[in-house]
Amino acid sequence: MSENTQKPDPKAEKINDLMAVVTIMEDYWRFHPANPDKQDVVQEYAQLEAIKDSIEKEIAELDVNSKS
């Protein structure tokens, strides 16, 4: 059995790091004060809470249905 002991490509790791940072920056830009189309973070959070609550309810219903 051979093990893959090859070290990750440093350039590929840097590209992955760059992609992660850009993704975070894009997400933050949605709420940034300099963004003329910024979203209201409080409103967005409330919407996410409602989505989370709905998903939790659906999971609970699936649990009840799977026990029957």
Image (cartoon, rainbow, N blue to C red):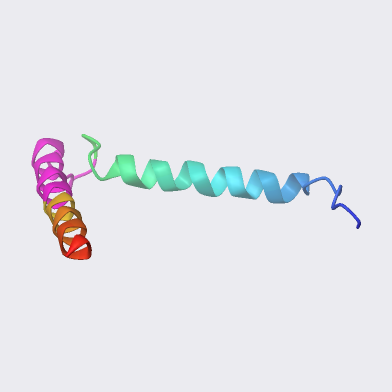
Q: Quadrant of residue 33?
A: top left
**Left of 38 or right of it: where is 13?**
right
Give, as a single range, the part of the protein colored magenta: 35-53
Give the answer, above or below, for where 46 lies relative to 63: above
Give the answer, above or below, for where 29 lies relative to 51: above
Residue drawn at 91 percent across, 58 percent down: 1
Residue drawn at 24 percent across, 37 percent down: 34
x then y, percent, for residue 59? 20, 55
Give the answer, above or below, for where 65 lies relative to 19: below
x then y, percent, for residue 35? 23, 43
**Left of 31 or right of it: where is 27?**
right
x then y, percent, for residue 31? 22, 39
Give the answer, above or below, for where 34 lies relative to 4: above
x then y, percent, for residue 25? 39, 41
Q: Main secondary structure of the magenta part?
A: helix
Residue drawn at 15 percent across, 58 percent down: 64
In the image, 46 versus 38, the foreground residue is: 46
Pick the quarter of the image with the C terminus: bottom left
Residue 4 magenta: no
Q: Quadrant of residue 67?
A: bottom left
**Left of 30 or right of it: where is 45?**
left
